[in-house]
């Protein structure tokens, strides 16, 4: 696994690595989505995050991500799209509803 991770990191451009980090940092973007877009499994994403982030930032991210249902499609409470709060108002005609 280690050699595959190293070879994939050499193939990815700095822009792609930044995008992977951005997607991994977002709570709502699942590892399955990252795999679909970049072909990276969860362990490879963790390797990138460990390599590119400061140690403290990496630890905070790992603590936040471990066990989070939204990072895995099978654990999500919704099938597709974004979760929408039942109290969230709808936006009509591109104008934000006033309270």
Image (tube, rainbow, N blue to C red):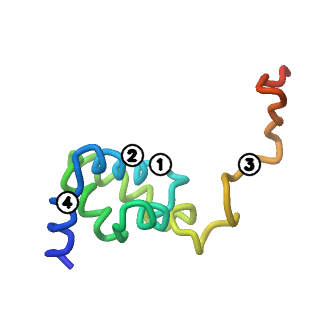
Q: Secondary structure at mark 1?
A: loop
As measured in the structure, the alpha-carbon distance from the residue carrying label 3 to the one carrying label 1 is: 16 Å
Disc 4 versus disc 3: distance between alpha carbons?
A: 36 Å
What's the distance in space between the residues labelled 2 and 4, CA to CA? 18 Å
Q: Are marks 1 and 2 in contact (CB under 8 Å)?
A: yes
What is the distance, in whole Å, between disc 1 and disc 2 at their CAs? 6 Å
Q: Secondary structure at mark 2?
A: helix
Residue 63, horizontal then vertical, whole percent: 39, 58
Does 39 sit above or below residue 64?
A: below
Of label 2 and label 4, which has the lower sequence position? 4
- Dot placed on the residue nearer the N-terminal end, 4 or 1: 4
Q: Residue at x 67, y 55 (%)?
A: 81
Instruction: Residue 87 in the image: state x and y as whole percent.
Output: 82, 41
Q: Seen from this angle, which residue lies furthest bottom? A: 1
Along the polypeptide, which appears first: circle 3 or circle 1?
A: 1
Which residue position holds label 2?
22
Q: Which residue is identified by label 1?
A: 26
Q: Which residue is mark 3?
A: 84
Looking at the figure, which quarter contains the N terminus?
bottom left
Q: Is residue 7 left or right of residue 84?
A: left
- Rendered-image quadrant of the C terminus: top right
């Amino acid at each position: 696994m280690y050699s595959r991770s190293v070879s994939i990191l050499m193939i990815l451009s700095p822009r792609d690595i930044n995008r992977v980090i951005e997607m991994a940092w977002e709570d709502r973007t699942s590892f399955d989505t990252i795999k679909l877009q970049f072909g990276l499994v969860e362990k490879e994403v963790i390797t990138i995050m460990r390599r590119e982030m400061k140690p403290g930032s990496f630890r905070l991210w790992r603590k936040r991500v471990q066990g989070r249902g939204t990072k895995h499609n099978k654990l999500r409470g919704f099938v597709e799209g974004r979760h929408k709060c039942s109290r969230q108002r709808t936006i009509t005609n591109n104008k934000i509803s006033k309270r």
